[in-house]
Image (cartoon, helix red, strand yellow):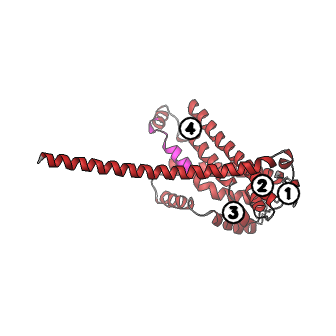
Amino acid sequence: MSMIRHNGNIKDIEKRRKKNMFYFSLFLFATLFGVITLAVLLVDVFIKGIPWLDWQFLNSFPSRFPERAGIKSAFYGTLWMLGLTAPIAFILGVGTALYLNEYAGDTKLKQILQININNLAGVPSIVYGLLGLGVFVRGFALGRSLIAGSLTMVLLILPIIVVASQEALKSVPSSQRNASYALGATKWQTIRRVVIPAALPNILTGTILALSRAIGETAPLIMIGALTFVAFVPGSPMDSFTVLPIQIFNWTSRPQEDFQYIAAAGIIVLLVVLLSMNGLAIYLRNKYQNKY
């Protein structure tokens, strides 16, 4: 009898081992497939784009001649977009998270707001483009300007910043709040001097990663009428504009082969901007984690 049980246990162990090996191989294959595909795409982009990436390309405006085309207006338009989107989204997002986490309590209003914010985080980006077109471009008569595009991007990334900031605020231990109250601090003093500094690394990381998504979006800006050909650097928030993804999209749609190489060079510039922002997020997170 004991021999039969022993053989049964050995068979069960062997089945579990084979099952573990199967899922390990499956997940390893999925990971390697994604990594290898990304590596192949990056190698192809760099091979095509590096020869075209020079000062003339960075300091020239778009042109119908590939050898004269550059990315200057799109690059400055992206910087303008970041400069307008970041402070508005940060203030609104963090302020909303502070209200929901610190002041709202367990009320019906909070539940309704929380459900809607979580749902908005999954809405397709083109829907925000339609909303921006109806509200900012036509409703507020801002036209096809930088500020209209920036406000549309704020709508796109605001739910992400709110959710990330809420999680950062929840990660602050209650003992720190209680210690502040025990010393006689008010609620706002506790939030300003204890809670926000402790949560700031994760808040900044979530905000910068959300902004990284914003500068890579094309559909919302196309919907509000961002131009594909801009031969000037924007000088004010009311100017027309283009950004790196739209300029790259425009070049890839051209039939001439040289424009495909210029688009690859533009992708490299966009990757540098994105990686720089991700590096800034890591630096700020480590800096404030060490401080607090």
Most common SS among magenta residues: helix
Task: Name the residue at 68% across, 47% down.
Answer: 274
Measure the alpha-carbon separation of dots 2 and 3.
25 Å
* Chain part drawn in magenta: 163-175
Asked if the residue at tag 2 contacts the one at tag 1, i.e. Cβ–Cβ closer than 8 Å, the answer is yes
Residue 199 in picture, x, y percent from top left: 55, 40
Task: Name the residue at 57% across, 61% down.
Answer: 120
Asked if the residue at tag 3 contacts the one at tag 2, i.e. Cβ–Cβ closer than 8 Å, the answer is no
For residue 181, side relative to residue 40 (left or right): left
Question: Can you identify the residue that label 3 sits on?
Answer: 220
Q: Earlier in the sequence, mark 3 or mark 4?
A: 4
Looking at this view, is 129 or 277 the one in front? 277
Looking at this view, is 249 or 243 the one in front? 249
Residue 95 appears in the rendering: no
Q: Residues within 10 Å of mark 3 (few under 14, many from 20)?
A: many
Task: Name the residue at 80% across, 50% down.
Answer: 76
Measure the alpha-carbon separation of dots 1 and 2.
9 Å
* Disc 2 secondary structure class: helix
Badge 1 amino acid: Pro
Question: Can you identify the residue that label 4 sits on?
Answer: 189
Within the magenta stretch, is there residue 171?
yes
Q: Earlier in the sequence, mark 1 or mark 4?
A: 1
Q: In which quadrant is the C terminus drawn? A: top right
Measure the alpha-carbon separation of dots 1 and 4.
58 Å
For residue 292, side relative to residue 228 (left or right): left
Question: Can you identify the residue that label 2 sits on?
Answer: 261
111 w.r.t. 32: above or below: below
Badge 4 amino acid: Gln
* Disc 3 secondary structure class: helix
Question: Can you identify the residue that label 1 sits on?
Answer: 66
